[in-house]
Image (cartoon, helix red, strand yellow):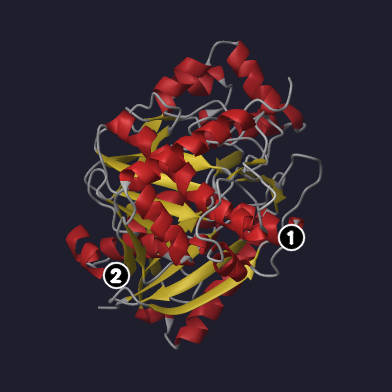
Amino acid sequence: MPQLVLSIDAGTTGIAVLVVDGDALVRTRVYGELTQHYPRPGWVEHDPREIWTLTRRLMDRALDESGASASDLAGIGITNQRETAVLWERRSGDPVAPAIVWQDRRTADICERLIDEGLEAEVRSRTGLLLDPYFSATKVMWYLEHLDGVRARAEAGELAFGTVDSWLLWNLTDGGVHATEPSNASRTLLYSLSDGDWDPFLLERLAIPAAILPQIRASSGRFATTRVLGTPLPISGVAGDQQAALFGHACFEDGMVKNTYGTGSFVLMNTGTRIARSEHRLLSSAAWDVGDGTNYILEGSIFVTGGAIQWLRDGLGIIATASETEPLARSVPDAGGTYLVPAFAGLGAPHWDPYARGAFLGITGGTTKGHLARAIVDAMAFQTREVIEAMVADSGIVPSELRVDGGASVMDLLCQVQADQLGVVVRRPANLDTTAMGAAYLAGLAEGVWSSLDDLSSRWRADAEFEPARSRDEVDASFDGWKRAVDRAKGWIEH
């Protein structure tokens, strides 16, 4: 039996394709950047054709560099940037317009209109989400309301909508399959968490024709067969990127938590088969369905973590490369009583304050650039603690560990500060490509490369573990200072 899996990780700034073997080791990884388009302030677009052509080119390259042939592959997995909306013609497969990326804010007015109509509580109850431009449905509404003739064509069944997973599935099957799965569907504002299907009430209220929607299938299982690599290959695993990362971390048990430290951070807790409704403005979504029913998550989105390091480098010129952050932060014993609140574009979970702005507080004549770097590291850990404490309050589950990935997680100092703040062990994996590994696991599980979730759990390897080392009194005092700093940064922009 073939023991290799091809994993496609179609992210926001680029696409990675991995060849993973049966020991869960990466044989080959190739990457290509995706062009970002900013046609107006607040607008972010991708060219759907580029997403597909880049993916297709990288698939060939990954296979070539691995030394394997297509016949050595057991299957293909896909993970993708979530919430990005693509609309295309069923007959030709051509995009109707550029893809509207998840970061795009053009639908803020639509969201305000829906809130004014009193729809927010209903949306929250049905979908587990907030009414925010972040999610896909208002992007679809924008297409239908602003592009000539699109609504009539959509109602006639001539058009197809999908997130990036659906777009790739369509192209991999030459238009034969229009499908998605629960983790992506649950980020559209159109998916009923309790029913596990598209919500007729929301489709009617948002005036979105059901004819454009993809079929929802299990996350692990045969979606389709593709011949693009010259031989029939099953596409057997699909999940949105953050849920795929949770799966790649083998966080299969209730209460297991992962955090990805990227430009921002995404903290996810597996709540098992229970939908945990948040009272702290966290998001409830589907995690995955591996054929035995849907698992769910609580998610907290933090807007800026690693982005503060980019600001230290590009905005202030204090460092030349991101790797200089940890040595600079270690040049001082602590942040010297300073706190950085990186609310550069507001605060995300659990505050959701778009009017907050960044602040560096506690500065004295003795404050140095080392203190600023240390305050940036501390802020990543403080924000994560805020979200996890909200998760504990919502779920009643106290996690016993935190599994981490993302660029900033390479810093031992960050992992140690995080362990101290949470009072639990922080584990960093040997393979930081957890998102792509999650897609590989979902596909390989369906095709018999791995026999069970227990088999996959045994493949997860820690590169380093960080135990709490500071006293709780000391840790809590620093966290209290952080909360005071956040209070001063909130509501800074008058409105």
Residue 427 % position (x, y): 33, 61
Nearest-to-viewer mark from 2 and 1 = 1
Q: Residues within 10 Å of mark 2 (few under 14, many from 20)?
A: some
Compare residues 129 and 425 and report the one nearer the observer. Answer: 425
Residue 92 % position (x, y): 65, 51
Residue at the spot 19% in from the left edge and 65% down from the top edge: 455
Give the answer, above or below, for where 283 lies relative to 366: above
Give the answer, above or below, for where 180 lies relative to 407: above
Q: Amino acid at mark 1?
A: Asp
Q: Earlier in the sequence, mark 2 or mark 1?
A: 1
Q: Amino acid at mark 2?
A: Arg
Residue hosting label 2: 461
Instruction: Answer with the quarter of the image where residue 223 lies.
Output: bottom left
Residue at the spot 36% in from the left edge and 81% down from the top edge: 72
Gap in angstroms between the C-alphas marked 2 and 1: 34 Å
**Residue 438 in sight:** yes
* Secondary element at tag 1: helix
Residue 180 % position (x, y): 44, 46
Residue hosting label 1: 314
